[in-house]
Image (tube, rainbow, N blue to C red):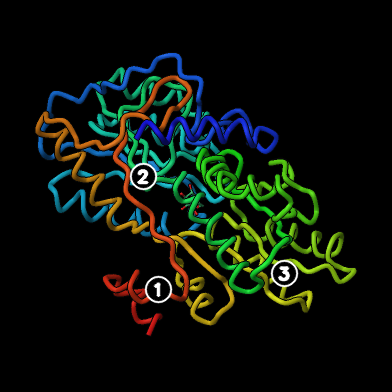
Amino acid sequence: MRKFLTRSIAAAGAVAMLALSAACASERQGATATGGDTAASPAAGFPADSLIGVALPSKTSENWVLAGDLFTNELKTAGFKADVQYAGASATVSDQQAQISAMVTKGAKVIVIGATDAAQLSTQVAQAKQSGATVIAYDRLITNTPDVDYYIAFDNFKVGQLQGQALLDGMKDKKPKGPWTVELFSGSPDDNNSGVFFNGAMDVLKPLIDTGDVVVGSGQQEVKQTAIQGWKAEGAQQRMDSLLTSTYNGGKTLDGVLSPNDTLARAIITSVKGAGKPIPVVTGQDSEVESVKSIMAGEQYSTINKDTRKLVAETVKMVKALQTGGKPEINDTDSYDNGTKVVPAYLLPPVIVTKMNAAEAYANDPKLAPLTK
Ligand code: BGC
């Protein structure tokens, strides 16, 4: 697993000009650890009916909606009391800060956090640690604090690499020889994952940009140009509208668009269709119903399957291990550096999905499998 961190640092240098804000400046975050201590301190067990807090960001994609429902049900089934909260629609970090503080006050023994803003929770997680709670960062790493015990996620750097590779594969299928003209989009700058996805994708794309095989048509490669605040569809649609006007009005062909998730991918496709242009190869993530339909219809090219059911189940397993005073299972102690320490992680493998493998990828998903028939 060390190779991931090494590769991350190398790529961070290569795409330094593209780096997101300080919170996202290196792949899996923070190649500048000062701590390096990977030993977490599990709680010494707690009553089986304890309160477990789950603080999720606003509902910016289907995966967050599903996660909330699953946590509520599965924590209850496991005998715990569950307090599941979302940050409000405006995604203000203060909502989430207040929710976490309230969970601490109510005596939560474990607090699972899908951070709204990776870098703005250090006071709250410090409070949680002082109260004896265990803090688990869920899907999104919490940065610049020693007070995160575990990280559980699909390997989000790998997600970015798969997106970059899918973009290339899709463009090569349509047009075997480059140069290919692309545009790049990245997620909300306050979400630590945005930088991880982008740097994973650039790990694959940058060498080809350097050789001129891939050309960013607008030249917009800096995060202040590519980021979509709040992961908002309308932000992506507006940016695509203006790119089409500024760069693709004179007959230049757009071969591909790197989109970090499905919500933005569909907005990008809407924009292109609205302009009466052919749909380029567009990547995505999350396996949202409308995007799976779009893939099967030959519009969106790819998505990523990060099965939320598995991620929540593994998180609840961690909570159960902590309840008995045991050590939760981790499988990575190298990759996810939050700027203060390398956070012990349990990583699940993401799966790239195109029309080619959709039936296989969703075979065990009762909601998505019928869409692939
Ligand atoms: C998640 C993605 C999701 C995005 C927007 C990210 O942190 O990892 O799966 O698309 O948030 O909700």
Asked if disc 2 is less than 8 Å from ligand 1, the answer is yes
User: Horizontal and vertical percent for residue 68?
Assistant: 35, 53
Can residue 105 be seen from the camera position used here?
no
The residue under the point 64% across, 45% down is 206
Q: Which residue is mark 3?
A: 271
User: Horizontal and vertical percent for residue 251?
Assistant: 86, 71
User: Horizontal and vertical percent for residue 335?
Assistant: 39, 33
Q: Residue 321 vs residue 41: left or right?
A: left
Badge 3 marks a residue whose secondary structure is helix
Other-residue count near label 3 (Cα within 10 Å), few / some / many at <14 / 14–19 / ≥20: many
Circle on res. 358:
1
Residue 187 vertical placement versus 306 (above, below): above
Q: 53 or 227, which lies in front?
A: 227
How far apart marks 2 and 3 lie (CA) works out to 31 Å
**Quadrant housing the C terminus:** bottom left
**Residue sitting farthest toward the right:** 250
Residue 314 vertical placement versus 47 (above, below): below
Q: Which residue is mark 2?
A: 153
Specify the amino acid type for callout 2: Ala
